[in-house]
Amino acid sequence: MNDFAVPDHAIVSERFITASGPGGQNVNKVATAVQLHVNIYALGLPPLVYNRLKSLAGSKINQEGELVILARNHRTQEANRKLARERVSAMLAAAYDLPATRARSRLNRVGKTERLAGKKNRSTVKKNRGRVAFD
């Protein structure tokens, strides 16, 4: 899946609500903020991608399995609608992104002996701490 656009059948609802923010008196009169509900089960994601999406979204997923995105940065409904869909697409792209696998560090013989010598030095330093005995 190269295109992370949200399919129309996955969108449960798209509501316009009044918002705070830029717009002056306009925000009190016009419902410009968008609340987008996307059914994550309808996206048909592979299990690993689904789990990454759940961890990325966190509390944005409700009990019904809907991803709820609120966009209210712009003054127009259309700009906020576009922003909400872009946020969902970005979240899907991040969920499809595989985490980098960690390469095991490999120590050579010299590195291992130096590490053990350092541990021995620290051991003797700590062993010499403590109560001073005046014999």
Image (tube, rainbow, N blue to C red):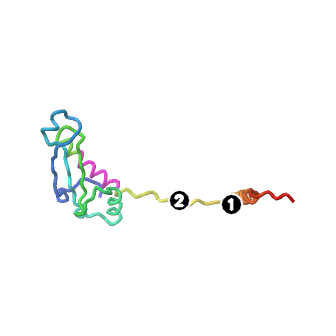
Q: Amino acid at mark 2?
A: Ala
The residue to which callout 2 is attached is 103
Query: Mark 2, residues whose alpha carbon is within 10 Å: few (<14), some, or many (≥20)?
Result: few
Question: Residue, x 17% and y 42% (percent of image)?
Answer: 32
Question: Residue, x 17% and y 39% (percent of image)?
Answer: 76
Q: Earlier in the sequence, mark 2 or mark 1?
A: 2
Residue 87 point in image, percent of width and height: 28, 49
User: What mark, if any, has residue 75 been given in the picture?
Assistant: none
- Which part of the image, by quadrant, shows the N terminus? bottom left
Q: Is residue 113 above or below residue 28?
A: below
Residue numbers of the magenta segment:
83-94
Helix, strand or loop at mark 1? helix
Number of numbered markers: 2
- In the rendered view, does 2 fall on the left or right side of 132? left
The residue to which callout 1 is attached is 112
Residue 72 point in image, percent of width and height: 23, 43
Question: Residue, x 34% and y 62% (percent of image)?
Answer: 49
